[in-house]
Amino acid sequence: MESIIISVFVIGYLAITLEHNLKIDKLIPALAMMAVCWALVALNVDQFPTWFDSAKHALVDNFSSLVAEDKVHILEETLLHHLGKTAEILVFLLGAMTIVEIIDYFDGFSTIKSFIKTKSKRRILWIFSFLAFILSAIIDNLTATIVLISILQKIIHKREDRIWFAGLIIVAANAGGAWSPIGDVTTTMLWIGKKVTAGKLIEYLLIPSLLCMIVPSLIASFLPAFKGNIDTDETTDEEKPKSKYSAIMLYLGLGAIVFVPIFKTVTHLPPYVGMMLSLAVVATFAEIYSRTKFSLTDFNSAESDSNAHHSPVHHSLSKIEMPSILFFLGILMAVAALESLGILFNFATTLKETVPMMGTELHGEGVSDLVVLLLGIGSAVIDNVPLVAASLGMFSQPIDDELWHFIAFSAGTGGSMLIIGSAAGVVAMGMEKIDFFWYLKKISWLAMIGFLVGSFAFMIMRSLF
């Protein structure tokens, strides 16, 4: 029966990976995979010889000798446990997404455009690289990529030039998301799963992530694509924000998101509680400012009337990407089914015994650096969310162990090596119609250099400190 469940997972996983070829949204196979896996577990709970207790990270003693009622009870408790942990992540993401949409409702991100005064392609490259690195650490790498490419489209009209900048934005955004507990879904999972703390994550990964962004940008700045200036006729005139509260809402929203790790550190409550408080504060100001948000010169009367009758919070909630939330629900709960049967635990044991050591082993349990590097390379081909979800069930190292920080960096930045390897890459591919093989030829080698430089920087820092 275990082999059938694994087969269902693999088939579902392939459907997710081949989303663009099959023309089926990845949330569909993710939800189906979750439901079928848990249904098979529930219908055959008597046949499984082992059961994994994720709370203790160990196999349940004498599980095979328990009576059927006890096994069903353990199954129900396990399912509720995993649903609770998954819900923590999803509620956190819902809050963060809503705050970002509220900022966008007030056209807050247009404030960033005013920072760019130069026409030099090389300087613009560095400005966007650092903006992507910083913004992705605050509002997540996916949103940062959308915001910056939208701004880029207003500054550079020539697509042949713009896609080069978009490629480096992907690399910088993924690097920026890796060192922040709120910068990427995978780091958020590790943070909420109590595998890393915000302070140690920044301490371990800020320098490797910075190098992962700087080195590719430095090499790219010497390429012909980034030489010279942008032609004057290719720039647009300065556009005024659609609301006089744009800058206020931008800084308020970003500050509210940054406040969440501080709230967790002080109160020791789960991160989603702090995110809900931040959302409440931002939403309060949004409701107040929305009364005077629009001017007659900015919108036609029909659109003004439409916005006047809708709360900015309701409007923002309606724009949240619910398919992404449902996808995370499906994939995390499907991985939880494999974890509960002890499959991931046994796979981790096999990895420790068979993969050769490379350099310093991680912690005392003998997890090779090579395993984590392969995980990073694998995240370029398949989604990094299930990879990190699997690692949570595979390894039992304590909080802030070097392994978890290396996994956060590797899974977060390794996806830059292919344009389909990260959410930032996929959205950039859609916004700019970037060809897969163009990215493979022009950007992938830069991303790989950044990934390797950052990885070796992490190993050196680990050995020194």
Image (cartoon, rainbow, N blue to C red):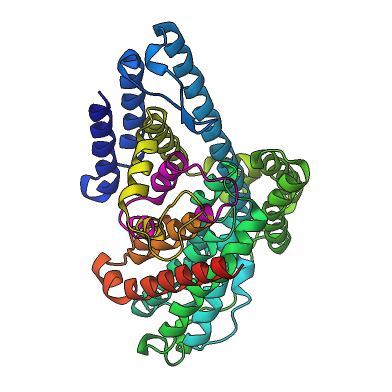
Residue 396 located within the stretch drawn in magenta: yes
Q: Identify the image quadrant of residue 349.
A: top left
| Residue 315 visible in image | no
Residue 306 located within the stretch drawn in magenta: no
Q: Identify the image quadrant of residue 308.
A: top right
> Residue 177's x, y, as percent?
53, 60
Identify the residue at image location x=44%, y=18%: 75
Q: Quadrant of the N terminus?
A: top left
Main secondary-structure element of the magenta-colored stretch: helix
| Residue 57 visible in image | yes
Q: In the picture provided, is 387 more to the left or to the right than 115?
A: left
Q: In the picture provided, is 47 more to the left or to the right than 455?
A: left
Total of numbered circles in the picture?
A: 0
Near-viewer residue (124 or 206) = 206
> Residue 417's x, y, as percent?
35, 66
> Residue 139's x, y, as percent?
58, 56
User: Taking 456 as reference, is 94 above or below it?
Assistant: above
User: Taking 34 as reference, is 309 above or below it?
Assistant: below
Q: Quadrant of the C terminus?
A: bottom right
Identify the residue at image location x=64%, y=45%: 312
> Residue 147's x, y, as percent?
52, 63
Near-viewer residue (242 or 141) = 141
Please report the bounds of the magenta region as a residue range. 375-404
Identify the residue at image location x=44%, y=38%: 393
Near-viewer residue (303 or 172) = 172
Q: In the picture provided, is 193 more to the left or to the right than 15?
A: right
Residue found at the far bottom of this picture: 228
